[in-house]
Amino acid sequence: MNELTLKNMLLSALLLFGVSNAMAEDVNLKPFVLASKAAGTVAGKTEQAKASLTAAGFTVVGNYSPYPDANILIVTNDALKKNAADSEHGGFGAIQRVAITKVKDEVQVSYTNPVYMANAYRMKGDLSGVAAGLAAALGKIEEFGSKQGMTAKQARKYHYMLGMEYFDDQDVLAEYASYEEAVQSVDAKLSANKNGVSKVYRVDIPGKQESVFGVAMKGATESEKYMDDRFIMSEIDFHDLRSTAHLPYEVLVSGNKVYAMYARFRIAINFPDLSMMGKNSFMNIMKTPDAIRDVLKKTVQK
């Protein structure tokens, strides 16, 4: 092989690598992954999913049934927690959510798309290994939740519209004297199930003063419906493929502060195609962002 031939081969490889990277960056990602849909029961499919996830090295840290015929498993593993430790406010991405939802005569098993979430939450790694692990454990038919989806670059800069929050616009709900005081107090307050807010799970991030809590929210009166998980999903989750894995919402203790993502971001990142006006739209849950913020702040404040 002469020197010219070798140079040409190296140049071709470099060009191909560049094209491949560009193509990877241009792939449109969507919020959720459909693993399977078939006849069965929610209970039966939940047990199958638990067994498959555990065998694949995931730990089930929580279970949440927000309404009949729907169940959500919250999972984590070492890769998720390590990436969370390496990323600012990475605790939000320390878990993935697996939903089992009965729709008509079929049960859909779906989960949050780790690569989409990693970019939406501006994490250091893209969690492609976690995505492969979930696909191997549960299956992968298609990504869904948005007709067009977003590139990784678009997801990292996402906000719904002008004047609305980005991921890094974190809402400070409370401040304590130390991380230890904050995490113990928040755990106790959420475990007390007050204000219609209850604890679903807690994951501590290794080597970092950070813990993420999953919270269930249930309004007891008509005036409280805008913070209620069931009401919110009844207005926005109406397509044939259900986005049940949007739930549950999170609260993050990082250092001595307690944070939540603004609902205008947290809801929109999972429902980016939801219209502003119309029958099923953000207009119908216009009071929800403030309702969620108010009830979370009331629950975790010092």
Image (tube, helix red, strand yellow):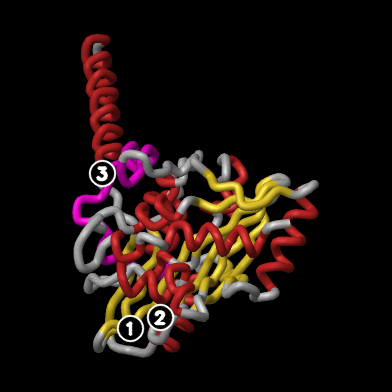
Marks 3 and 2, Cα distance to the nearest angstrom?
A: 30 Å
Residue 77: name its quadrant: bottom right
Q: Which residue is mark 3?
A: 27
Q: Which residue is mark 2?
A: 70
Measuring from the top left, give residue 186's x and y in whole percent.
70, 61
Residue 270: name its quadrant: bottom left
The C terminus, quarter of image? bottom right
State if disc 2 and disc 3 touch (CB < 8 Å): no
State if disc 2 and disc 1 touch (CB < 8 Å): yes
Q: Which residue is mark 1?
A: 102
- Specify start and end residues of the magenta stretch as a single range: 136-161
Marks 1 and 2, Cα distance to the nearest angstrom?
A: 6 Å
Name the foreground residue: 54 vs 169. Answer: 169
Measuring from the top left, give residue 295's x and y in whole percent.
56, 64
- What residue is shown at x 72% (from left), y 46% (from top)? 256
Above or below, comparing residue 253 to residue 229 in the picture: above
Instruction: Identify residue type, mark 2.
Output: Ala
First-in-chain label (3 vs 1): 3
Frontmost of labels 3 and 1 is 1
Is residue 226 shown in magenta? no
Classify mark 3: helix, strand or loop. loop
Marks 3 and 1, Cα distance to the nearest angstrom?
A: 30 Å
Frontmost of labels 3 and 2 is 2
Q: Relative to residue 97, is residue 21 drawn left or right?
A: left
Above or below, comparing residue 30 to residue 57 in the picture: above
Label 1 neighbour load within 10 Å: few <14, some 14-19, many 20+: many
Instruction: Identify residue type, mark 1.
Output: Lys
One can see residue 76 in this view: yes
Instruction: Identify residue type, mark 3.
Output: Val
- What residue is shown at x 45% (from left), y 81% (from top)? 46
Dot label at residue 62: none
